[in-house]
Image: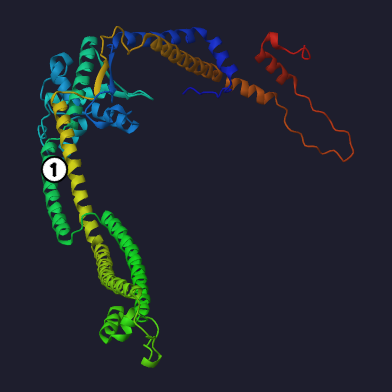
């Protein structure tokens, strides 16, 4: 059995072994390169086609003018990779062009067969997979959707052995994705739902309006703020008028009291009990101070009053009558003004008490009206969106259709050549190191035996302390054996 000798794991050892066995290294390198070249020509070529789509520039949703977020782009990419998009694309292109096996065999591998045998099932048990299912499962591995960074562009990529079929299927995937996206955005029954809600809130508006109208009519409250402002203005005006009336009343009472006191000094008044009583009744409570009494007959003024005093008496009585009637009118006006002020205060109190209910009913009417307007607006918008979806208008557009590729993406010639060189180099180095290890191990036993014979045996040092040590030299026979193993050209100058 061959024995291997451990080599020094250094770059110099590897390079030296490759240089020493360069023929084996070169042949191994050429074989590795030829292997990859043969694989390049034997592997069927695969072509890649791509279609670019723009999302969010024209569509039916309200966010069509805004940039689609990254989450939305990732979601659209997952939708484009789903079988719901791949299956319609297969139907567009056809199973024959895609070169998918049309047999309805079982998709059950070796593991499935072994499992069936263990369970005691027959080989034909299990669901039968259709050609469409097999095609969708196989082609989904060749479809990839990429999102371009910092943009709203989706790129659908498909790989196939036929370049024409690759381009056709990529375009079919784009159209299927657009149709799928329109279908997902479609909301059947949404228009009818919003119409029902609009009718319901219209009825609610009518009901709340009727309640509000009944309350307003009953409480005579139409606008709390405006009515309060008007009532406060009227109350202020009535208070000012009432103050003026009271001042006027006091003025008239003073005039009547003064005129009554003056008339009592006249002789026609003092001499006639009737006139004196009349003056007292007309003056009434307006008289201030004690009533002057007429002097006794003995102390009275002799003679009849002159005509001038009679004229003064007449004018005074007339003025007293007028003052009395004015005082009655002013008192009635004061009473009316006080009643008006009390009524306004009562209306303000009632208005404050009904303000809470008024505001609640008003708020209910406003809320119902707002909801009705919102649903009416959403009904119109949903109807417009439904019409746009029915017209097959989507917010996804094709900006670059797929063209027939002119060059295969796999296998790549330069990459295969580089891989062949790397593989051949590694394999060549491994072979040269193996040869070097085997060749070095063949001479190892002889050299080891001769080296052991040339090694001096240890001598016990039995000399006393302080004595000069004795040097032991190798024997001549061992030296000659070493020289013979080294060869005639490797004898040291000392041995010569």
Seen as rendered, the residue at the extreme right is 466
Q: Identify the residue at image location x=82%, y=28%.
A: 471
Q: Identify the residue at image location x=25%, y=9%.
A: 404
Disc tally is 1
Q: Position of residue 155 (x, y in %)?
A: 30, 20
Question: Left of 410 or right of it: where is 463?
Answer: right
Q: Is residue 468 above or below residue 419?
A: below
Q: Is residue 282 visible?
A: yes
Of residues 452 and 46, the one nearer the viewer is 46
Q: Identify the residue at image location x=14%, y=32%.
A: 383
Residue 468 placement: quadrant: top right
**Label 1 CA crowd tier, 10 Å (few <14, some 14–19, many 20+):** many
Of residues 425 and 460, the one nearer the viewer is 425
Of residues 350 and 327, the one nearer the viewer is 327
Question: Left of 207 or right of it: where is 418?
Answer: right
Q: Which residue is mark 1?
A: 198
Residue 47 placement: quadrant: top left
Disc 1 element: helix
Q: Identify the residue at image location x=66%, y=14%.
A: 486
Q: Is residue 81 visible?
A: no
Question: Left of 171 or right of it: where is 316?
Answer: right
Residue 170 placement: quadrant: top left
Seen as rendered, the residue at the extreme front is 303
Q: Position of residue 231 (x, y in %)?
A: 28, 59
Q: Position of residue 221 (x, y in %)?
A: 20, 58
Q: Position of residue 150 (x, y in %)?
A: 38, 25
Tell me the quadrant of the picture where the C terminus can be found. top right
Of residues 460 and 73, the one nearer the viewer is 73
Question: Left of 442 or right of it: where is 225?
Answer: left
């Amino acid at each position: 059995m061959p024995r291997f000798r451990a080599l020094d794991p250094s770059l110099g050892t590897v390079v030296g072994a490759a240089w020493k066995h360069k023929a084996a290294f070169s042949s191994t390198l050429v074989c590795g390169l030829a292997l990859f070249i043969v694989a390049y020509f034997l592997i069927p070529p695969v072509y890649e086609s791509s279609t670019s789509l723009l999302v969010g520039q024209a569509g039916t949703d309200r966010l069509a003018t805004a940039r689609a977020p990254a989450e939305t782009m990732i979601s659209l990419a997952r939708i484009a990779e789903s079988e719901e998009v791949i299956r319609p694309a297969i139907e567009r292109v056809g199973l024959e062009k895609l070169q998918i096996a049309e047999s309805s065999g079982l998709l059950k591998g070796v593991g499935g067969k072994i499992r069936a045998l263990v369970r005691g099932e027959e080989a034909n048990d299990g669901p039968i997979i259709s050609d469409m299912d097999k095609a969708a499962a196989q082609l989904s591995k060749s479809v990839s959707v990429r999102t371009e960074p910092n943009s709203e562009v989706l790129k659908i990529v498909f790989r196939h052995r036929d370049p024409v079929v690759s381009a056709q299927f990529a375009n079919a995937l784009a159209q299927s994705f657009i149709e799928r996206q329109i279908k997902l955005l479609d909301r059947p029954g949404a228009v009818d739902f919003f119409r029902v809600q609009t009718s319901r809130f219209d009825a609610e508006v009518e009901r709340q309006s009727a309640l509000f109208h009944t309350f307003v009519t009953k409480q005579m409250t139409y606008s709390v703020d405006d009515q309060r402002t008007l009532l406060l203005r009227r109350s202020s005006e009535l208070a000012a008028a009432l103050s003026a009336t009271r001042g006027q009343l006091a003025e008239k009472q003073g005039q009547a009291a003064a005129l009554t006191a003056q008339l009592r000094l006249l002789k026609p008044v003092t001499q006639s009990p009737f006139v004196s009583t009349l003056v007292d009744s007309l003056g009434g409570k307006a008289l201030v101070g004690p009533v002057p009494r007429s002097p006794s007959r003995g102390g009275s003024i002799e003679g009849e009053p002159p005509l001038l005093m009679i004229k003064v008496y007449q004018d005074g009585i007339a003025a007293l009558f007028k003052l009395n009637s004015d005082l009655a009118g002013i008192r009635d006006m004061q009473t009316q003004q006080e009643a008006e002020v009390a009524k306004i205060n009562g209306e303000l109190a009632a208005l404050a008490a009904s303000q809470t209910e008024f505001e609640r009913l008003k708020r209910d009417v406003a809320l119902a009206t707002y909801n009705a307007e919102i649903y009416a607006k959403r009904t119109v918008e949903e109807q417009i969106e439904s019409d746009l979806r029915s017209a097959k208008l989507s917010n996804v557009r094709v900006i670059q259709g797929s063209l027939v590729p002119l060059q295969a993406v796999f296998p790549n010639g330069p990459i295969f050549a580089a891989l062949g060189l790397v593989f051949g180099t590694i394999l060549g180095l491994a072979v040269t190191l193996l040869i070097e290890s085997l060749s070095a191990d063949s001479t190892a036993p002889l050299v080891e035996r001769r080296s052991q014979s040339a090694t001096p045996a240890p001598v016990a040092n039995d000399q006393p302390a302080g004595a000069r040590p004795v040097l032991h030299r190798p024997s001549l026979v061992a030296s000659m054996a070493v020289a013979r193993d080294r060869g005639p050209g490797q004898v040291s100058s000392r041995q010569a």
